[in-house]
Amino acid sequence: MMSKAVEEIKEPTVKKRNPRRVVAGLAGLSGALFLASCAKNAPQDTWQPKGENAQKIDDLQRPVFAIAGVVGLIVLVAVAVVIFRFKDRGQPIPHQTHGKPVFEITMTVIPALILAGVGVFTARTVFDLAKTDDTEMIINVTGQQWWWEYDYPVQDGISAPIISSGQLVIPVGTKVLLRETSRDVIHSYWIPALNGKRDAVPGRVHTLRLEADEPGIYAGQCTEFCGLSHANMRMEAVALSKEDFAKWVDAQLAAYQSPTEGLAKEGEAVFIAQCSRCHQVNGLENANGDPIISAPEENVLAGAAPNLTKFMSRNTFAGATWDLLNKTCRDNVWNATSEEFGAKYLAGVSAECLNVADLRDWLRNAPAKKPMYADPTKLADTGGLTRGMPNLNLTEDDIDKLMAYLLTLK
Amino acid sequence: MFTTGSKFYLGISTLAAIVSVVFLITNDQVALGCVALLGLMVSAGIIAGASLASRDGGDTENATTSAAADPAPTSSIWPLALTLGLVVLIIGIITEPLVFVIGIGVILAALAEWLVQSWSERASADGKFNALARKRILNPLEFPILATAITGVIAVSFSRIMLAVSKDGSAILFIVIATLILVAISLFSLKPSIRTTTVAAIATVGALGLVAAGITTFGIGEREELVIAAEEGHYSHQECGEEKSKYYDKHVERTVSSKSGVIATVILKDGELTAQVLGIGEGQKQITVPRANPTSILFQNLDDTEHRLTAYLGEKPVAEGVTEDDLRCTQMIGKGGKQVLTVMIKKPTFAEGPYTLTVPGIEGTSIEMIVP
């Protein structure tokens, strides 16, 4: 009995890690991360500048990363040498000395000089990016949970105010100044290919310069956590040639054309009854011929909802979270050559190209598709106002009509 | 003949009988109150009878050996404080929620003190130990609460004095009182042998003097400047015409808001209004304001006389079928002065516009606010 008891009491076995496996695992992880940098389809890659401002950042960050990389490598090698050379092999403890002034001063002065050098170039870039005196166009950008609104004040080439959302349309080779603010919480505007990020703060106006070298679509993302659907608060900057931009302006300022008959006409009635409370369509009139003015401030906490005047001239909806174009047509626009891009973009969204599935889902139950606190049981917390679009409980018939009507908004 | 208990209840019964008679005389009809009073008379009479029958209190042996024969408890102010708390509570129900809360606070404090005192007096046969037991429990609560209350009273008293004396006088007074406190504390620290009671007496006299001055100045009221300012309501910017407030904030440009990010700076110079718009430059007669978003505009007056900037934001309903101009404005700003004007326009220009910025008293110049 005694011996059996002794047998049962054994030292706990400690599972030793195989160092080779650990090293192999770490190497694999590092390799995967490294290979991720080779991704082709990376529209928000910060290392691919497509404009003057982003180029300035790139010109700064590349040498800084190189210097940081060299310093990091030296430190790593030094640490590795120390670890392997002086590891415990049972040797006696070496003679202890206190300090080495020359070495310490050198190791302080060198990093200080490196930082000072980097600081000079960084400061110069910061001031360059903050310039506003060479602005050629201004656009007001207003953030709210969870979409961006763009309005174009009257200026050279724009004879009346234009208001849009989701996609920022700018002319190529033009120094555009965004004047950012917010209606609710702090957001941050970032199109990596065109410039760095800039916070949009309620009650303040911050500026951000943008300039695109070539026509195309440049993707971005809100980079300040702003609530439940922060990840769904995206944006796209669309750069058009100056001629195409003028066409876009003309199209945006064109008078509203009310559908005359059919499903679209019925959809207009549904829109007036259900959507015009929050969404403005400039030119839309009621039966008496009076303009219909939306009142989003009475229904939405942020006080605004996207103006849908030329809705189908954009390629995205719901805070640029979903495409209005189906995949084939989207790829056709995104992958167009510089020469073809403008014409393809300005064609807008046709019935054949419409992303029916996502738009129908959105109209059927918006908060189910994009989390927006639009839960009717929690409206007491916001004084009856919704954050984002609520579920309007539209019938499938109404959705058919609305889709037909929305397609006419070009 | 009558025992102690029976005397008490007979008294209540007799009093109830008298009051019910008075009640019957003064009221035309038998009311619920009379029934209650008669019920009290009868029930107290029954208890008095039972007390008499059982010779309650007539037992001399128990009178010396029972718990009731223990020494009477020491006098206590807490029943009085409890009553005071109840009165304050009732007054608070009628008047102010704050008074109601104070009443609850007084009641809770009085109950706690009374309960602990009552318990401590029965903790042992040793009076000194009982007193120590009470202190051990209550002092950790009493001292901080008392200190907070005293500090609060002194602070309120001091603020009343500051609001009553002139602006310059308040600064001098502040310096004098602070200096006196500093000197007194320095002297105490130089004389460690000074008796605690002396320090306490000086501090008490100082505090009482401050409170007395606070009560007196509370009676006198705030200085004239503040009274007029409150009556004019200039903080709410009610006056958007040419009129000039007698008192106003002469240093509005020092406020934090004037440093905020503004959408435009509107400048009045030589009787002409122009806007300096970020990114566009000077000399603009039009600014774009986002819809339904508080937007700050900085007004700078470069004219010699005082002016204010007034924003016309459409019409607002004031009664059924009655509207008036919805105006927002800065205060009167002297030469070189600046002030931020924050506006929020809910409807686009084509719905209710045009929205304008003007200077009352100067005709023919304005800035248009475009809301897309």
Image (cartoon, rainbow, N blue to C red):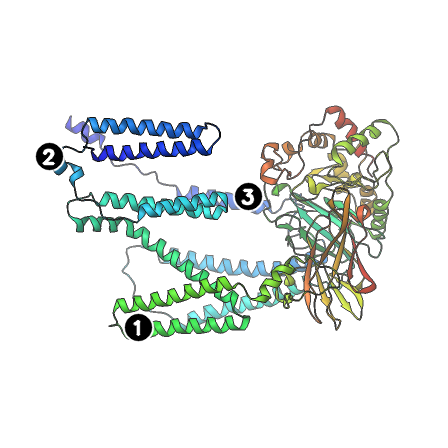
Disc nearest the viewer among 2 and 1: 2
Q: Residues within 10 Å of mark 2 (few under 14, many from 20)?
A: few
Do the residues at pointers 3 and 1 share their chain? no
Badge 2 is on which residue?
B61
Q: Residues within 10 Å of mark 3 (few under 14, many from 20)?
A: few
Q: Secondary structure at mark 3?
A: helix
Badge 3 is on which residue?
A32
The quarter of the image holding the N terminus of chain A is top left
Q: Is residue A98 above or below residue B136?
A: below
Residue B287 picture quarter: bottom right
Towards the viewer: A267 or B60: B60
Asked if labels 2 and 3 touch by Cβ distance under 8 angstroms, the answer is no
The type of residue carrying mark 2 is Glu
Spatial CA span between label 2 and label 1: 63 Å
Q: In this rendering, would A150 be left or right of B113?
A: right
Badge 1 is on which residue?
B189
Any mark on residue A398, and which? none
- Residue with the most extreme right position: A260
